[in-house]
Image (cartoon, grey):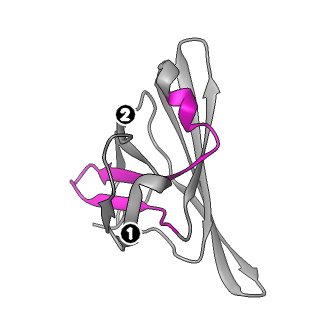
Amino acid sequence: MNANNDQIGNKITLIPIFDVQNTNGNNFSLTTDRNVRILYTQNDLVFDQKASESEGGVLYNQSLTAIVAKNKELMRYNNMHVLIVLETLSGKTIVWGSKQFPVRSKCVPLITAISIELSCSTIFPVFFED
């Protein structure tokens, strides 16, 4: 990341999209918080975002991989549409995804951890600026 960008911290919140009532920028409301999971990663998070031109305009392909402690419960989030809440090291909260453009989660079990591969294609870029 360059000097104008903030780094992502190691806290990540997964919210199943079916629990999200609505989203508006970095604000959202939930129908229930029963399925919300707060995780702490074992790796540095690197948010990858690439813009590509399409017939409808610019499309942003975004991805992030988090390595978290092994937890059997997390496998139920495999192939689920989610809303992700990230926090930067300066304390800024970033909401990634929406009801219209949810983030897709893929959980891959490792020997002592779980890799959560998150991806989203959207018309909205994500900024991590101070």
- Check residue 22 in the rendering and tell me which mark sits there, or answer none: 1
Residue identifier under label 2: 39
| Residue 101 place in picture, x, y as percent | 56, 67
Residue at image location 34% in from the left, 67% down from the top: 129
Asked whether 87 or 28 is in front, the reply is 28
Residue at image location 38% in from the left, 69% down from the top: 22
Q: Quadrant of residue 115?
A: top right
Kind of residue sitting beneath label 1: Asn
Residue at image location 47% in from the left, 20% down from the top: 71
The residue furthest right is 55
| Residue 107 place in picture, x, y as percent | 61, 33
Is disc 2 placed on a helix, strand or loop? strand
Image quarter of the N terminus: bottom left
- Check residue 100 in the rendering and tell me which mark sits there, or answer none: none
Asked whether 62 or 25 is in front, the reply is 25
Q: Which residues are the magenta region?
A: 74-99
Is disc 1 placed on a helix, strand or loop? strand
Residue at image location 41% in from the left, 32% down from the top: 41
Image quarter of the C terminus: bottom left
